[in-house]
Amino acid sequence: MGHLFVEFFQNTGFYLCDYRYIIMILIGFVFIYLGIVKDYEPLLLVPIGFGMLVGNIPIFKGLGLGIYETNSVLHYLYFGVTQGIYPPLIFLGIGAMTDFSTLLARPVLMLLGAAAQTGVFLTFLGALALGFAPNEAASIGIIGGADGPTAIFLTAKLAPHLIGPIAVAAYSYMALVPVIQPPIMRLLTTRKERLIRMEEPRVVGKKEKVIFPIVAFLLCCFLAPAALPLLGMLCFGNLLKEAVVTERLAQTARTSLIDIATILLGLTVGASTQGDVFLTPASIKIFVLGAGSFGVATAAGPIFAKIMNLFLKTKINPLLGAAGVSAVPDSARVVQMVGQKEDPSNFLLMHAMAPNVSGVIGSAVAAGILWSFMA
């Protein structure tokens, strides 16, 4: 009887556990806490956090339970991550819920979204300097776009062994936008600049809204064909929204479809952070580089807006530049929050959405360019 009890105990997670699993479970608790209590990107952090708990239950290898075992259910679900299936589905939903009218009303603001991609390419160079292979460096650099699906998609194509740390880093910085961005924005702008009021945008006609996703898709994908899977789905989703006659399809894309893809992506990415695989020196370097990438991307926008103001008659509030990262709509909300601390009657949210949505396009184009160079 005692022998059976010992054998049973040796099969439990308590016996098989080591400190790495415990660390990752604690990090999972932090993610769940930030999502539920702090309301930081709960639709992302709660699935990822619980996925970390799922992925760090110690188990015997060969039972077909772990995410890295080819015969497990989790492994089959993770296939959508490793093969880049979930990110385009999420982009389809984002396109179906995004209004590009603010961007069309003042196209010059698109440059702020492009400027934010500076962080991507500078971090790429930094990762190379730290000894990462070119394909790994490209995957790490895209974290600066603050676009989790794009980071996962590119990493799945270039460095699938780094999907776990890169995805967790990307979504962590997306969730912490309200914490990370305001100090950088205040540091790089004066109070006078933060008080600049933006002119009311012109009214954008329905025809422009319908034509835009088609033209944007063709121009961007001719420029960076490798961005086709992401931008194609983004623009298709937006066309479904603006065409009106396909509202039923748009409704499905921006509700059920994106929710299912987000659940599966978040849970499996979290489960991929298995302690004995995830906790490596490379993961720590990725988190540090990711933080630097996001910081540079945030700073590049306000700096570029200040440069633009040297040539523009109607000045741009430099705070808008911080919305150039593609954390939609959180970065735009942060711009509104920081602006209203200086002047409660100054409403910047609508204007900030222009660089914010252009940042989504910019990060997808940047990913396409990096992929084409590494292929």
Image: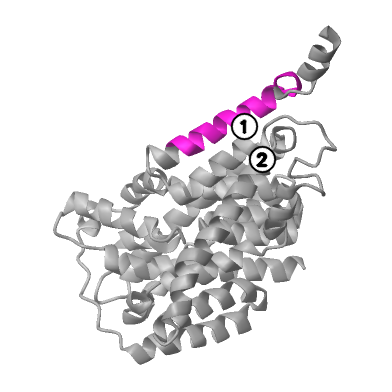
Q: Nearer the viewer, residue 119 or 360?
A: 360
The extreme bottom residue here reads: 207
Query: Is 188 part of what is drawn in magenta?
Result: no
Residue 341: x %, y % from top left: 20, 49
Residue at the image position 64 percent from the left and 48 percent from the top: 268
> Residue 360: which disc?
none
Range drawn in magenta: 14-33
Vertically, is 210 above or below 254?
below
- Label 2: state its secondary structure: loop
> Residue 273: which disc?
2
The extreme front residue here reads: 1
Mark 1–mark 2 Cα distance, whole angstroms, equals 7 Å
For residue 110, say whether it is visible: yes
For residue 172, say whether it is visible: no
Residue 86: x %, y % from top left: 62, 62
**Quadrant where the image shows the N terminus:** top right
Q: Nearer the viewer, residue 63 or 319?
A: 63
Query: Is 19 part of what is drawn in magenta?
Result: yes
Residue at the image position 55 percent from the left and 59 percent from the top: 260
Residue 346: x %, y % from top left: 18, 61
> Residue 24: which disc?
1
**Within 10 angstroms of label 1, few (less than 14), some, or many (20 or more) residues?**
many
Q: Is residue 267 left or right of residue 173?
A: right
Q: Are marks 1 and 2 in contact (CB under 8 Å)?
A: yes
- Which sits earlier in the primary sequence, circle 1 or circle 2? 1
Residue at the image position 35 percent from the left and 67 percent from the top: 353
- Label 1: state its secondary structure: helix
Q: Is residue 322 left or right of residue 294?
A: left
Vertically, is 117 above or below 92?
above
The extreme left residue here reads: 345
